[in-house]
Amino acid sequence: MLIGYINEIAELTGTFGLPEIPPPPEPVECDYYYDIYGCDKTLMEDMTEKKGITGLSVNGTYYAFTQKLSFDGSHYIDSGVVPTVETVVEIDHQMNDTANAWVFGSRKASNQNAFSLNVNMARTAYYPRIGSNSNYSFTVANERHQIVMSKSGINVDGELKKEFSGVTITTDLNLYIGALNQAGTVTGAANTDIYTMKIYDSGNLLRYYVPCISDENSRGLFDLVNYVFYPLLSL
């Protein structure tokens, strides 16, 4: 059962403006919480307003939403999603060092059935890889960016950076977040902050990740589509 109400959103603290949070699938039970005037988590009474939610309790475990999830180069997350030619990834992130690393991705081998985003901030360059294409790269500032990547191309902060064509992907490898899944091996783990991330396929929203920390002090991403917590995994 979902319960909660926010009367005046301007008076809330600790909110991150999460829009249009979908209802959880059955039979998940959850309660929404928000913080007001710096107090501890406060149970909401109905779902009239969703944007001020700062945490939720699912099946007895409380998850507090945080502004970002920091990857330190020694962790990753398995999204459980196998990319296809119809996959679209939207991610809000910032790199924290100049290492040559992957923000997300999977591939069988170099330039084989890839869906990945490699970043080398020493060159201030992004290297999207999709299908067998490898000749895409562009320069960006080392700051926070909003990325949208699909078979059509890659957009950064609303600007089309590269247009793709002739993309084909055939793989059984899950997309990793904060690293690359190369033929089942974790490689190229990034030092990056992730603020939000969405994964679509054929127009369907499969994952809507927000950073969080559980009341058991486990950090990771919470999927607001399926109401599943994805913890950071160590290399």
Image (cartoon, grey):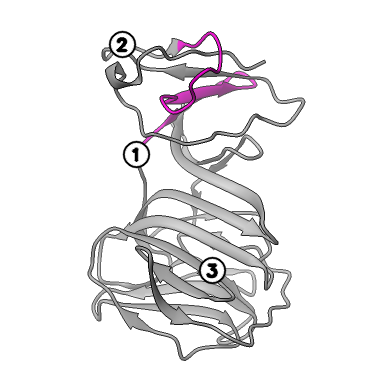
Extreme-bottom residue of the structure: 135
Extreme-right residue of the structure: 27
Q: Residue at horizontal 51%, vertical 80%? A: 129
Q: Residue at horizontal 35%, vertical 20%? A: 9
The residue that mark 3 highlights is 105
The answer to if 38 sits in the magenta stretch is no
The answer to if 62 sits in the magenta stretch is yes
On the image, the x and y values in percent for residue 30 come to: 62, 20
Question: Is disc 1 placed on a helix, strand or loop?
Answer: loop
Is 143 placed above or below 11 here? below
The residue that mark 1 highlights is 67
Type of residue at label 2? Cys
| Region in magenta | 43-67
Q: Nearer the viewer, residue 146 or 183?
A: 146
Is 78 placed above or below 49 here? below
Q: Do the numbered discs 1 and 2 sit on residues whose CB atoms are within 8 Å?
A: no
Q: Identify the image quadrant of the N terminus.
A: top right
On the image, the x and y values in percent for residue 26 come to: 76, 27
Type of residue at label 1? Gln
Disc assigned to residue 39: 2
Q: Residue at horizontal 45%, vertical 57%? A: 91
On the image, the x and y values in percent for residue 29 come to: 68, 20
Is any atom of residue 133 visible in this view?
A: yes
Is any atom of residue 181 visible in this view?
A: no
Mark 3 / mark 2, whichever is N-terminal: 2
Question: Is disc 3 placed on a helix, strand or loop?
Answer: strand
The local crowd at label 3, few if under 14, some if 14 to 19, many if 20 or more residues have their Cα within 10 Å, is many
- Which quarter of the picture shows residue 102? bottom left
Circle nearer the viewer, 1 or 3: 1
